[in-house]
Image (cartoon, grey):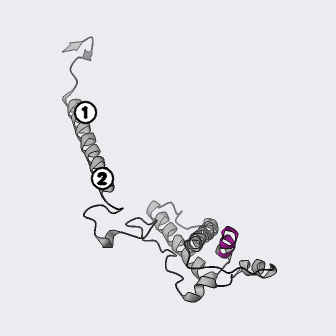
Amino acid sequence: MKIGGITSVPAGTEAVQAAQTRSDAGKFMDMVQSLQNEKKGSEGVGKGVSGSQVLEEGRLNGDYRSTFNGTYTAASDKKSMPQGAAANSAIMTKNPKTIDRTSKLYEKSLELESYFVKMMISSMRKTVVKADGGNDYAQNMYEDMLYDEYATNMTKNAHFGLADEIYMQLA
């Protein structure tokens, strides 16, 4: 029925879409509720999750980046001398500090150093002029992931000393 050009009954598609939205919202809320109930009833691991799907702290399932976890495991890594730029500041003090490279704090210090190295590499990457324009989203994404790995490997192997300095300041 039309009254002055305005219909008083909504179109059938609008009603179907509204019903579908309500149905989806209900299913979503049911899913959230069941996940909350599972979390309350378990000790950090959801029901039906196998041990191989549980990753170490701070990592997401599907996160395939290299990490610093397990990089240093030798007994000599518990009390090692600083390397790189941090070695100069450690020698200058009256009480030279040692570093526990197996600690969580040192692992996080390595991650921060890796972030700084990634920023440096990204700045260098911006100076390279690409012949094809370089506006391909997928290519840029994969290059960014590649440079993340470069930064991680450089941090593990180059011994810049920034992580050692961060550790000594925080420990």
Dominant secondary structure of the magenta stretch?
Answer: helix
Q: Amino acid at mark 1?
A: Ala
Q: Position of residue 79 (x, y in %)?
A: 63, 84
Looking at the rendered structure, which numbered label has been put on residue 31?
none
Q: Which residues are magenta?
A: 164-171
105 or 139, which is in the foreground?
105
165 in the magenta segment? yes
Camera-near label (1 vs 2) is 2
Left of 30 or right of it: where is 112? right
| Residue for point 55% across, 75% down | 152
Q: Amino acid at mark 2?
A: Leu
Looking at the rendered structure, which numbered label has been put on residue 18?
1
Q: Dot 2, how many residues are within 10 Å of its Cα: few (below 14), some (14-19), or many (20+)?
A: some
| Residue for point 29% across, 51% down | 37
Number of numbered labels in the structure image: 2
Residue 115 picture quarter = bottom right
Q: Secondary structure at mark 1?
A: helix
| Residue for point 47% across, 61% down | 136
Name the residue carrying label 2: 35
